[in-house]
Image: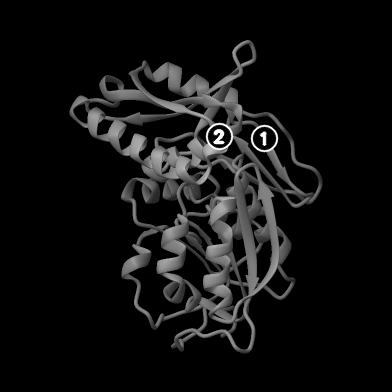
Amino acid sequence: MSVASNLRQVSFITGVEAEDLVGVLLENELGMTPSTHTDMATGRSTVSVYAELPKEQVADLRRRLKDSWDAAHEEAPHLGEAVVRIRKVRPLDWAESWKRHFRPLEIGSSLLIKPTWSRRRPHSGQAVLQLDPGLSFGTGQHATTHFCLTQVVGLRRPEGQSLLDLGCGSGILALAGALLGYDPVEAWDFDPEAVRIAAENATLNGLGARVRPAVKDVTQLPLVPDERFDVVCANLMHDLLIAERVRISARVAEKGHLVLAGILTSQFTAVSSAYLGLGWELEESATGGEWTSGCFRRTATTKVSSNRRSARPGA
């Protein structure tokens, strides 16, 4: 069946205070960055993604989203209630929604992220990353992705560095890194559709030869890696960050940095403690809405598996 016949709006209807939480639940389930519409008269927000979804999968998706909300709501009961709504829409509704909600985004003076239809011009010396909406997408608007982008910008060095984007989604972090001079750059995701979209975005930005997204599951990565990276970004669910901390840590080069995101503020202490227990040092953290992200620095006592080679220029 065609995309048009199966295109659906998958939404949470909730209070403004729960927008960030339900947005990440949708992104974790469907691999897409949501858009948000707030009714100022009622104070209710509709947080949505647009997905190709056959009719026979609707009930199961509704159940999974409700279960995810119930589990998250137990940790943040002050956020009120949320209702799941799934409805069939025309493709035009989806495309126009992205045009309304995906606005150009600047990360300092170094990076401009914009949709292809935007006429926004970069400042002098500002790298430009163009993205088209896809059924798997990330735009940098969410607090967790925004934190990762600021770290990719802030951690770059004149001598050059390597970058790994774990759970790359649209490829936004890897592509931003490549435009900013990171080399080599790797982008991995367990979802083939996300990898396909990331590869299309790489081609769109003239980076197809430098960034080649690959299907890889962090839970299946070898404990002893073939290569390590100066900066590793892992914007993943908190339980996965904790369970796979050894595999993730092993991919950071000596004196490298590890950026962790996708973490509810109520979960951040547990995630941070898990990595501090391996000898990592928390260098910077930031909270946006219900989410807290952190940048960790490798220390001499960090406990990780040994590596075979380092993915660093000249190594």
Which numbered dot is residue 79? 2
Viewer-nearest of labels 1 and 2?
2
Q: How many marks?
A: 2
Query: Does residue 305 appear to the left or right of 55 in the view shown?
Result: right
Check disc 2: other Cα within 10 Å, few if <14, some if 14-19, many if 20+. some
Q: Residue furthest top?
A: 41
The image quadrant of residue 154 is: bottom right
Query: Does residue 289 appear to the left or right of 4 in the view shown?
Result: right
**Which residue is rendered at x = 36% and y = 17% of the image?**
89
Asked if 186 appears above or below 171 in the picture, the reply is below
The image quadrant of residue 299 is: bottom right
Q: Position of residue 48 (x, y in %)?
A: 46, 28
Name the one closer to the observer, 17 or 168: 17
Element at label 1: loop
Quadrant of the frame with the N terminus: top left
The image quadrant of residue 280 is: bottom right
Q: Position of residue 192 (x, y in %)?
A: 32, 50
Residue at the disc numbered 1? 104
Name the one closer to the observer, 120 or 27: 27
The answer to whether residue 212 shows anywhere in this view is no
Asked if 116 appears above or below 164 in the picture, the reply is above
Q: Position of residue 129 (x, y in %)?
A: 61, 45
**Which residue is rendered at x = 44% and y = 76% of the image?**
246
| C-alpha separation, residue under disc 1 versus residue under disc 2 | 29 Å
**Which residue is rendered at x = 46% and y = 28% of the image?**
82
Disc 1 + disc 2, Cβ < 8 Å:
no
User: Amino acid under label 2?
Assistant: Leu
User: Amino acid under label 1?
Assistant: Pro
Name the one closer to the observer, 77 or 25: 77
Q: Residue furthest right?
A: 124
